[in-house]
Image (tube, rainbow, N blue to C red):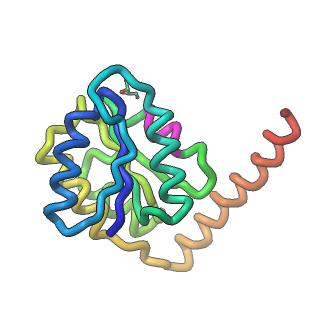
Amino acid sequence: MRVAIGADHGGYPLKGILLDFLSAGGHEPLDCGAYGPGPSDYPDFARAVAEAVLRGDAERGILICGSGVGASVAANKFPGIRSAVCHDSFSAHQGVEDDNMNVISLGARVVGPELAKELVGFFLDARFSGAERHRRRLGKVEKIEEEYRGVCNELE
Ligand code: RB5
């Protein structure tokens, strides 16, 4: 699978480990930065990963910052991106199966490399169930995006 991956300085070392993990697992990682360990801003990498997924350059995305929270908050501002911080295996696969999560956010100051690899494995192996009740709920999420996009445009 083509997987976009991005991290700020908090997640930079873990990104390197996950890049190797993805390649070893037969995936095609797309490195969206940061490209060095110096201080950087997680919204820049959330943008790069989100745009890669929305353009279709990658099927899924992985974001890493210190806690996973900032990266997830930023990623969810992009209509069509569904991201969550997942530090347990159940959420990492159920978030895809039920909620069609397309970007997982990880906190490198919270989880170690082995757990991070396991979480990414669950995330990438999972598929959206397509069940009617989940489509209905996601339709409501999309309606919120649509309605509030209009509100934001009016405020500009
Ligand atoms: C950066 O120090 C840190 O705030 C960031 O990596 C992340 O944890 C934000 O949620």
Q: Quarter for ligand 1?
A: top left
Residue at the image position 60 percent from the left and 48 percent from the top = 78
Residue at the image position 22 percent from the left and 51 percent from the top = 19
Location of the C terminus (image quadrant): top right
Q: Main secondary structure of the magenta part?
A: helix
Residue at the image position 21 percent from the left and 49 percent from the top = 18
Q: Nearer the viewer, residue 91 or 36?
A: 36
Q: Does the magenta stretch include residue 113?
A: no
Q: Report whether 146 appears left or right of 87.
A: right
Q: Where is residue 47 in the image (x, y as percent from the top left)?
A: 52, 42
Taking the view exactly as shown, the residue that stands out farthest to the right is: 154
Location of the N terminus (image quadrant): bottom left
Q: Nearer the viewer, residue 141 or 24?
A: 24
Residue 63 falls in which quadrant of the image?
top left
Residue 66 falls in which quadrant of the image?
top left
Q: Where is residue 3 in the image (x, y as percent from the top left)?
A: 35, 60
Q: Give the residues in magenta.
A: 70-75
Taking the view exactly as shown, the residue that stands out farthest to the top is: 39
Relative to 139, residue 65 above or below: above
Q: Where is residue 7 in the image (x, y as percent from the top left)?
A: 35, 37
